[in-house]
Image: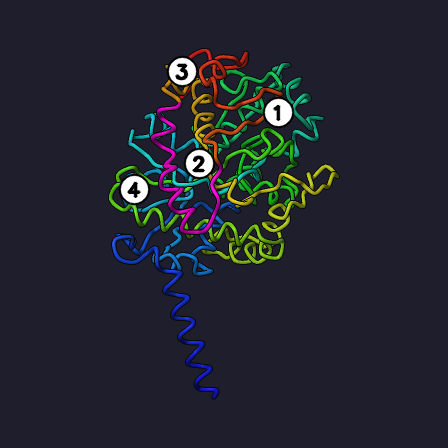
Amino acid sequence: MGRIAAMGEAQMSILADTIRDKNIAGPDAPEKKTLKVGFMPLTDCASVVMAAVKGFDEKHGIKIIPTRESSWASVRDKLLSGELDAAHALYGMVYGVQLGIGGPKRDMAILMSLNQNGQGITLSHQLREAGIVDGPTLASAVARRERSYTFAQTFPTGTHAMWLYYWLANYGINPVSDVRIITVPPPKMVSTMRAGNMDGCCVGEPWNNKTIIDHLGFSATTSQEIWPDHPEKVLATTDTWVTRYPNSARALVAALLEASRWIDASLENKQKTAEVIAHPAYIDTDAEVIASRMQGRYQDGLGKSWDDKHRMKFFDGGAVNFPYLSDGMWFMTQHKRWGLLNEHPDYLAVASAVNRIDIYRQGAEQAGVSVPSSLMRSSRLIDGVCWDGSDPQGYADSFSVRAEKLFV
């Protein structure tokens, strides 16, 4: 009797596997099954890592090999050379490559968004000791021109650069002419702050929190205070790769959607995720440094603590992951604002080419994830200005604080 029951369970398991795999057999099977996916040691690499650790990749007929990189330039170069199949990447970096302003010009592809929120701007304790604790006091100090101020971002066309510039400009500080801007890879931000080589930085977690825990700095703002539920990292590859391996691209999207859904399902899952990605192979720091802000538990290093309702999101019913055209267009408007682009691009055409909504929809269907009906979304940023993608040229030209010449 027990043997019959066991045989029944085995047969049921086979049947379940057959049903599960019905979309990845025959002509729909991934053309390339082992995929090297690059990532930077940041909290928002979580879905790449957990897709491999939890076996969501194998469910969709692929094997993800998470590959830790040392800088965003390395991620870019290895994508372009084909050493990486895909990567956890900065949204604006992908558009920079597409437009030829972030390295070699190459047609790129964004398959999905990986997360929203969860970055920050951290200022040094030296500024705090000088009475500079927020945007207005920083603006007053910069205006006095008693000394120069240096701020770091992680890649010139990337998200952190754009959040930093937008925040500075909101207080009348021109990042092109009023302060010095340097590029520092994310895992080196803490040591650069410790060495006294910068006054502040914009970087992803857990490095803001680590800087506070090490008593080197304090949070001036979070990226979600600049733009609530803003787009952040994406799953990127080249257009050539998608053309060659469309089924693998679809399977990769499905696997990362499954991982994203699992991570966001509970605070317990976030804690488990933090414990995994804290490993030296991934982020290489204490799990609690990652978990606290990942779960929305914030403290700013100045005595304030709060639960952030706009904490880092990985799924939110799939709303996080849809590659909205308006999100991609926004980064181009800021590239134009800061002189990285001399002329206005065809915003909608470029975004439609880069953001592969066709592949995303296929992957979402395979993972059982609903897809938003609109290709655009509306957001209101820290300055009160609404962005909805309807007039990108007018939006890019509307800012009073902007570059007067090409800024490289």
Q: Residue at x 48, y 44 (%)?
A: 370
| Mark drawn on residue 242 | 4
Q: Residue at x 42, y 12 (%)?
A: 405
Q: Residue at x 26, y 39 (%)?
A: 240
- Front residue of 267/163: it is 267
Q: What is the C-alpha distance between the residues marked 1 and 3?
A: 25 Å
Sequence-wise, which precedes: disc 2 or disc 3? 2
Q: Residues within 10 Å of mark 1 (few under 14, many from 20)?
A: some
Q: Residues within 10 Å of mark 3 (few under 14, many from 20)?
A: few
Q: What is the C-alpha distance between the residues marked 4 and 1?
A: 36 Å
- Secondary-structure class at tag 2: loop
Q: Tag 1: residue type?
A: Ile
- Secondary-structure class at tag 3: loop
Q: Tag 3: residue type?
A: Leu
- Front residue of 130/304: it is 304
Position in image of residue 152 (x %, y %): 51, 31
Position in image of residue 164 (x %, y %): 54, 27
